[in-house]
Image (cartoon, coloured by chain):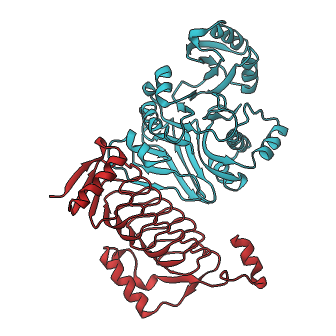
Chain colours: A red, B cyan
Amino acid sequence: MPATLDCAKLTTREINTTIKRLATEGEIEIHLVNPEARHSLGVAIFYQVKIVIEGTAGYFCGGMNDGATFHVQGNCGWSVGECMLSGEIVVERNAASSSGASIRGGTVVVKGHVGARTGISQKGGLIVVGGNTGYMTGFMMQRGTMIICGDAAEGLGDSMYAGTIYAGGEIKQLGNDAVLKEMTGEDVHFLSETLERYGLSDKRKIADFKKIGSGGRLHNFSKADFELWRVAM
Amino acid sequence: MCGIAGILFKQQAGPIGDILIKMLADLNRRGPDSTGVALYGNLPKGNLVVRIKVDEDVQEETIDWEEMIVETARESGSVKQSSRAGQYIRLVMDFDGPYEELTSAIEASGQGVEVFSMGQHLEIIKQMGSAQRLEATHNISAFYGTHGISHTRLATESRVDISHSHPFWARPFPDIAVVHNGHITNYHKLRRYFEMKGHRFNTENDSEVIAIYIADIMEQGGTLEDAVRSTITALDGTFTYLVATADSIGYARDQFGTKPLVVTETDEFVAVASEEAALRKAFLYELDTREADAREVRTWHLNREGKASALEVSASLT
C-alpha cells in the first residue's frame, strides 16, 4: 500500500517535508492527491522513492531531484525538474515553459506539448517530448540529449555549445549556430529504444528524425563570424 | 508579476463574475495591490451603461455625487437608471454617442471624477486590495454574462491607485477593455503618437496604450485579429495581455513568451489564466490545458443574434 498525502489539507512545506520523512523511514511509493496545480511539489527530494502526483502540478515540480521517480498524471507548470541531478520525471500530458531547465542528469519525459525554452542550459541527462516544443528550445545546451517527437518552434538549439537534439517533426527555424548532423545507426537504435521505453513509439517514425548539434562557430570569437555573434548576443 | 484571467461562454450567458472572482482570489499571489474585472452583460440595444469613479466612498460622502453626475449626464441623453456602490456610480442611459463628449462632460462635473467604462455590455470595476474586498463591495459573483477579463496587479511602475489599476477601457471606444501582464517599453513613443492623433490618456500606466492601440486599429476598420496580431511587433517589451470587445475576447504573447498564459477550451467555454492553479479554483476538475506559445495570438467571437451554437472560432499563429 503506497502512502497517500492529501495536498488540500497540507501546506507545500508540509507536503515536501513529509515526503522526505516517509522516504527516510523506508517508504517506496508516495501518492499526492488533490494537487490542483500547486507550485513546488516534490522539490529537493534526494531519495530513491516513487512519487505519483494524481493530477496536475504547478511550477518547479520535482526541482533539484536527485534519485526520485515522479509520475505526474496531469499537466505541469513552468520548470518541471529544474536542476535535476538524477532520477526520472514522467508527465502524462502537457508541460509549460522551461521544462527540464538546467538539468545535469536524469530524465524528464513530457508526453504532450511543452512551452518555450524547454531544456534551456541543459547540462546532461535526457529530455523527451511527445508533442511540440515552444520558442528557443535547447537554448545554450551544454551537454545531454533531447528528443522532440512533434514540431519545434523557432530558435531550436540556439547558441548550443554541445549536446544532441533529435527532432522528428517540422523545425520552424534552427537557432544560431545549431546545425544538422548525420544520423548514425547508434542514433537510430537509441531513439527507438528510448521511445519504446516511454510508450511514444507511435508518435513519430524513427526515419523522420533529424539530428541537431552545435556548429562550433560560437565556441571561440572570430572576426569572420561577427555577424553571427551580433545576432546571438 | 501581475495575474490575468478571462472567460467566455460560447453557448449562453454564464456565471462569469463568480468564475473570475475565484480565479482572482488565487491570482492575488501574483498581484496584491489591486484587483479588477471587465464584465460583459447583455443590455438591450440602444442602452449605454457607464461606470464612473468618484473620489469619495459612499459612506463618507460630503457631496451627493450621484445626483450631480446624473444631472450632468441628463444634458447628453436620458438617464434610465442610476445606482451607487463604494466609489462607483453606475448609470444606464439612452445614448448612442458621441462617447468622448459624454465622457468629458461627466469628468468635468467634479474633481477626481473618472469614467472607467462605457458601452452596451462592458462594466469595469476595479479596486485596491484583494478579490475578497472587490467582492464585498460590488458582489461581482452575482454577475451573469457572456465573457469577461480580469487582473490582479503587482505595481512595478506608475502610481498605485484605483485609476492606474487594470482593466483599462479603450477610451472613448465603447465596449473595449484590456488587461496586461508585463511592461511596454516603447510606451512613451506610442503615447506621443496617439496623443498627436487626438486620443486621451487618463493615466501614466503603460498598459493603457494597448487598449488605445487596438481601438485605434479597429476604428479604422481593422478586425480584432488584425489589431492583436500587429501588437506582437508594434509593442516592445514583455507582455501577455487579454482584450475583450462587445462580442469577443483574445490574447497575445510577446516574441519571447516571457509572461505566462494557460489556455483551456471546451464546447461550452474558453478560460485563460496566468497559472493553472487559478483555473482549478474556478473549475473543480482536471482540465485539458496548454501554455500559449511565444508570439501566439488567438481570438474567439460570439454571435449574439444567433445565440446558441452560432459561434465562429478563429485561431492563428503569427
Residue B260, above or below A147: above
Q: Is residue B223 visible?
A: no
Q: Position of residue A87 (x, y in %)?
A: 35, 70
Q: Quarter of the image containing the C terminus of chain A?
A: bottom right
Q: Is B255 positioned to the left or the right of B279 in the image?
A: right
Q: Position of residue B40 (x, y in %)?
A: 53, 31
Q: Residue at x 35, y 44 (%)?
A: A11
Q: Residue at x 70, y 37 (%)?
A: B158
Q: Position of residue B65 (x, y in %)?
A: 65, 10
Q: Residue at x 64, y 49 (%)?
A: B228
Number of numbered discs present? 0
Q: Position of residue B216 (x, y in %)?
A: 73, 41
Considering depth in this image, is A177 or B154 the residue closer to the camera?
Answer: B154
Residue B76, above or below B265: above
Residue B178, above or below A42: above
Q: Quarter of the image containing the N terminus of chain A?
A: bottom left
Considering depth in this image, is B299 or A122 the residue closer to the camera?
Answer: A122
Q: Residue at x 63, y 55 (%)?
A: B254
Residue B295, above or below A217: above
Q: Which residue of the protein is positioned furthest toward the bottom in this rendering?
A: A185
